[in-house]
Image: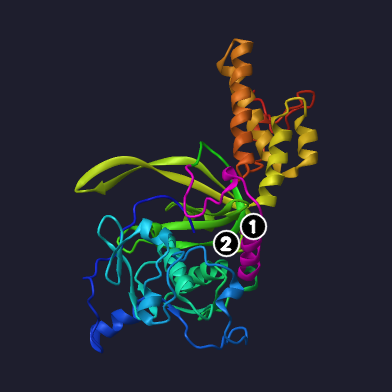
Amino acid sequence: MAQDKDEHIDDVSPGSKPKAGGAAAVEEAKLNFIEVLADAADSSSGKTKRDKKARGPDRNSVQGAPKDESASGRRSRVPDSVQERFIQIGNNFYFPGGAEAFRRESNRLTTRSENAIVIQSMVAIARAESETGSVKVGGSDFFRKEAWFAARLAGLEVQGYAPTEFERERSARAVAARSAPRSPEDAPEAQKEKPSSGHELITGRLVDHGPAPYQHNPKATMSYFVRIETDKGDRDIWGVDLERAFRHSLSNPGIGDQVGIRAVGKEPVTVLTEGRELDTHRNQWSVERKEFLDQRRDMAAVFRDATISAEEGTRRHSGLEGSYRTLEMGESHAKEQYSSKTHRTQFVDHLREYIGKAIEYGQPLEPALPRTQEERTVNHSEPDRDYHPTR
């Protein structure tokens, strides 16, 4: 998935190794890993050992370095992109802030993180060091899925994860998009969340969503993420309210669906940061299928058109009956409150736009409530059967 925040990973003493058995063994079992396979066979494809030259030159490897078939020689292949992001001390790699990101142990790279940048960097090292073009991934379900995708994008064969059909298709699309010529403006923006401008509708194919520590940082507070696949790469959106948005969605989007995500409001909240209370806000989100939002956009356009009568608008979209009823009540209120025709018109126009925006944003439609007794038209030409004058 993807957004731009500071990374913090659990600290581990450099060079320390867990002892076998007990709590240390449990901790070891929790580690996520990518293992560079030395075996010539690839159980996932049935292919024999491949010549590294067949995969073409490794753009991530150090150019011009003398070939060293020893294990220490393979371990020295750290791509420039990794060296620029992390500080390497021995076999440990740290973020510039000092937190450990991942470590290397023989032919295995391990981490407690599920951070996308960490996973991509581990894959880059594995690709530079692999003589067979095959790796094995292990750890949490989320890590294995993300590592599988990153490794396939790097041209590696992967054991340890069985992708779904959708994930295979997504991988194929990503590989094709990477090979297509792009201008600098069209470069993929994966791993960075763009700030939402107002009520911008963010669209793409739903890849994954769920609760997770913010930015997949083990030390961060729990949040909720949504990952979508766009024409410019994957994009991650974070927000606690996204969980509620999925629960209350009117169109129930699923993995692989084209969706639209929009911040529809802000909720004031008080958070505790560095021992102080801070007043801030939390985005309120809407998540719906794109086809549902397209239909709502058409409904909103009809409702906003003042030249279309309520009868005609309801005939085109029966779900608008309650919205027109609310607008009618607003018109009655304006007649009672404002003597100026200009003020009445302004009030009704603002109300029409307010309701129209709710329709377009995929909010629940106004219910079609029955008219009250006072609002019903009384035919005074007929006597009231319940009227009995006293003598």
Expressed as whole percent of the image width and height from the top left, the position of residue 210 reads: 47, 62
In this rendering, the answer to whether 271 lies above or below 336 is below
In which image quadrant can residue 348 be found?
A: top right
Expressed as whole percent of the image width and height from the top left, the position of residue 360 reads: 64, 40
Q: How is the image coloured?
A: rainbow
Any magenta on residue 160? no
Structural crowding at the residue carrying mark 1, measured as other residues with C-alpha within 10 Å and reported as few (<14), some (14–19) or many (≥20): some
Question: Magenta region: which residues?
Answer: 167-195
Q: Amino acid at mark 1?
A: Ala
In this rendering, the answer to whether 317 lies above or below 222 is above
Would residue 48 be found to the left or right of residue 319 on screen? left
Residue found at the very far left of the displayed protein: 275
**Residue wearing tag 2:** 207
**Residue wearing tag 1:** 177
Q: Amino acid at mark 2?
A: Val
- Measuring 31% from the left and 81% from the top, which residue is drawn there? 28
Any magenta on residue 174? yes
Task: Say which of marks 2 and 1 sits in front.
Answer: 1
Expressed as whole percent of the image width and height from the top left, the position of residue 57 reads: 55, 67
- Measuring 64% from the left and 17% from the top, which residue is drawn there? 345
For mark 1, give the secondary structure: helix
In this rendering, the answer to whether 264 lies above or below 4 is above
Q: CA distance from mark 2 to mark 1?
A: 16 Å
The label on residue 27 is none
In this rendering, the answer to whether 146 lies above or below 271 is below
Structural crowding at the residue carrying mark 2, measured as other residues with C-alpha within 10 Å and reported as few (<14), some (14–19) or many (≥20): many
Along the line of sight, which residue is nearer the eye, 112 or 13? 13
Would residue 277 be found to the left or right of residue 286 on screen? left
Residue 332 in sight in this render: no
In which image quadrant can residue 27 be found?
A: bottom left
Along the line of sight, which residue is nearer the eye, 38 or 272? 38
